[in-house]
Image (cartoon, helix red, strand yellow):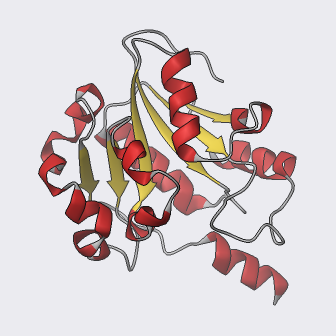
Amino acid sequence: MPHVEKGMQVGLFGGSFNPPHAGHALVAEIALRRLALDRLWWMVTPGNPLKSTRELAPLAERIALSQRIATNPRIQVTAFEAAHRVRYTADTLALIRARNPGVDFVWIMGADSLRDFHRWQRWREIMLTFPIAVIDRPGATLSFLSSVAAKTFDYARIDERDAQLLARKSAPAWTFIHGPRSSLSSSAIRAGTRA
């Protein structure tokens, strides 16, 4: 787990990154800037319980590719979940909270993930652990309005103009951040590679 100091604002950007691409880097840069983060952990997961692992590239390869793309010195690529044998996001966040008292974390996800967020293991617990920043993705801008999670936690949404305050808020708190979007997707890149 990367080292951070008390009082820091740290973004948690997790995914399989299979493969990582410029769209992921754009989300990370938007989060760093709009959330006024000191650091961002680019967390390469060993797998994704909601996706097939047949097409999953080896973890070491996904880490190396992520390190090439995540060039901002405030971004730290990590795969600590594999070392701790953590499978679900709720468990990852509990581990992070226990090991880093006094650090303000924000979970970062793309709008496309929010659409299916209610299918995640213990998704309500995730919403209640750390504030969440949802970053706009092509084709998913409107889906956040109708998602189960957005409707359930509508009362906890803050205006994106106040996004820089999100890390200091108590969960549940979340915001939707509009901005430049990349049409790249890992599944499309994998499909193109096979073709």
In the image, 163: left or right of 105?
A: left
Quarter of the image for residue 114 reads bottom left
State the residue at coordinates (72%, 62%). Answer: 18
Q: Is residue 122 above or below residue 107?
A: below
Q: Is residue 48 above or below residue 13?
A: below
- Rendered location of residue 8, percent (x, y): 40, 17
Q: Is residue 68 above or below residue 41?
A: below
Quarter of the image for residue 141 reads bottom left
On-image quarter of the C terminus: bottom right
On-image quarter of the N terminus: top right
The residue furthest bottom is: 195
- Rendered location of residue 144, percent (x, y): 29, 69
Q: Is residue 31 above or below residue 115?
A: above
State the residue at coordinates (17%, 50%). Answer: 157
Q: How many numbered badges does the structure rendering display?
A: 0
Asked whether 88 or 173 is in front, the reply is 88
Residue 71: tell me if it is visible.
Answer: no
State the residue at coordinates (69%, 39%). Answer: 86
State the residue at coordinates (77%, 45%). Answer: 63
- Rendered location of residue 37, percent (x, y): 38, 30
Residue 114: tell me if it is visible.
Answer: yes
- Rendered location of residue 130, percent (x, y): 37, 35
In the image, 20: left or right of 110?
A: right
